[in-house]
Amino acid sequence: MGWNTALFALILGLAGCGYNSIQAEDEQVKASWAEVLNQYQRRADLVPNLVSTVKGYANQEREVLTRVTEARSRVGSTQATPEVLSDPQAFARFESAQGQLTSSLSRLLVVSENYPQLKSDANFRDLQAQLEGTENRIAVARNRYIKSVQQYNSTVRSFPNNLTAKAFGYQQKPNFSVANDAEITKPPRVDFGATPASASGVNN
């Protein structure tokens, strides 16, 4: 009976020190991160077909096409394992690689405005629409991750939860940079009616 009482007291103690909250919020962070990765992978999967289609009409834009391909390659070589959430430097490398791909894709869409035949290609228009939808989903997924990490980090920093977090090895998690988050998550503009002269309004 004494052992059962001690065990019950320990359970109550852990609950009172925020252990259950830390566990639940840690799982929410992991789920939010998984969705971010899922949407980024969806975007990466669109790149080869997009580059191939543009190349068919604008092969002379080799520098832009090369930058998109290289940016996708860097994204693929960035290890997005669960351990990234415990390594701020690895997280920063991941964020940087994704930001470079966002920028290069935006530039690719700017260039496409100069090729009317490319803009009227049904496959290209479909890929543009898919890219726009995916970028929107990325923005939503990132926002959810940001909020879940903010909640988790707040919990593990507060007393007495911080003692529980330290005892069980729960550390603060890196988050997307607030300074450039709006720019990075801004979807590439898809304007089927734009002319080359108005294309300068597109992100690059």
Image (tube, rainbow, N blue to C red):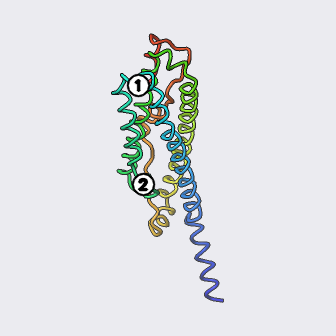
Amino acid on which disc 2 is placed: Val
Extreme residue toward the front, this view: 56
- Measured as percent of width and height from the top left, residue 118 is found at 50, 20
Q: Please tell me which residue is depicted at 45% across the width and 66% down the height of the picture.
A: 169
Q: In this rendering, is residue 39 above or below 186?
A: below
Please tell me the numbered disc located at residue 195: none
Is residue 27 or residue 80 the one in the foreground? 80
Is residue 176 or residue 199 the one in the foreground? 199
Is residue 128 or residue 177 the one in the foreground? 128
Q: Nearer the viewer, mark 2 or mark 1?
A: 1
Quarter the C terminus occupies: top left
Extreme residue toward the left, this view: 63
Please tell me the numbered disc located at residue 204: 1
Q: Please tell me which residue is depicted at 51% across the width and 62% down the height of the picture.
A: 161
Q: Please tell me which residue is depicted at 49% across the width and 34% down the height of the picture.
A: 49
Residue linked to disc 2:
84
Is residue 76 or residue 82 the one in the foreground? 76
